[in-house]
Amino acid sequence: MAAPPVNYHNETTEKELNVTFEYFEDIDKELTLDSTTKLPDFRWSKVEEGGASFGFSPSQFWLRLNINNTVEKTRNF
């Protein structure tokens, strides 16, 4: 099951977004955006409390994040 959405509001911080995404390690670096959207949920790993740290790796890492926007203005992170 995918991570629950982040309720984005005016006070949402980068730290809140950092602990709510999931990742998939593409060891062979063969996936495309389209193929990652078709991966089953169990293939994705949830980031543990404290954020992600992948270190140095030859792999590609795909990230996914579900955001529920509750404001009308644009905000850059």
Image (cartoon, rainbow, N blue to C red):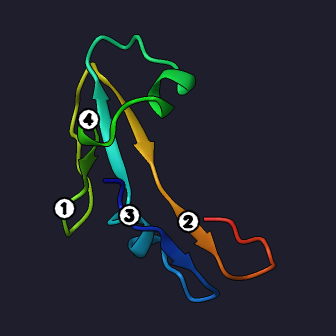
Marking on residue 67: 2
User: At label 2, which amino acid type do we have?
Assistant: Ile
Disc 4 secondary structure class: helix
Mark 2 → mark 4, Cα distance in angstroms: 20 Å
The residue that disc 3 covers is: 18
Q: Position of residue 55 (x, y in %)?
A: 21, 39
Look at mark 4 in the image and give the residue it sits on: 43
The reply, left or right, for residue 77 in relation to residue 71 is: left
In the image, what residue occupies the spot 19% across and 61% down? 48
Report if the CB atoms under discs 2 and 1 are less than 8 Å apart: no
Nearer the camera: disc 2 or disc 3: 2
Mark 1 secondary-structure assignment: loop
Residue sitting at 55 percent across and 26 percent down?
33
CA distance for labels 1 and 4 = 16 Å
Q: Nearer the viewer, residue 28 or 15?
A: 28
Q: Residues within 10 Å of mark 3 (few under 14, many from 20)?
A: some
Considering every residue shown, the one lying at the far bottom of the view is: 11
**Mark pair 3, 1: CA separation:** 10 Å
User: Which residue occupies the foreground of this view, 30 or 4?
Assistant: 4
Name which residue lies at 61% across and 84% down: 9
Inspect the image, locate mark 3, and give the three-letter code of the amino acid beneath it: Asn
Label 2 or label 4, whichever comes before in sequence order: 4
The type of residue carrying mark 1 is: Glu
Of labels 1 and 4, earlier in sequence is 4
Q: CA distance from mark 3 to mark 4?
A: 19 Å
At which x and y percent is residue 37?
50, 33
At x 37% / y 14%, what residue is drawn? 29
- In the figure, residue 17 lies in which quadrant? bottom left
Mark 2 vs mark 1: which is more N-terminal?
A: 1
Q: Which labelled disc corresponds to residue 48?
A: 1
Q: Vertically, is 22 above or below 38?
A: below
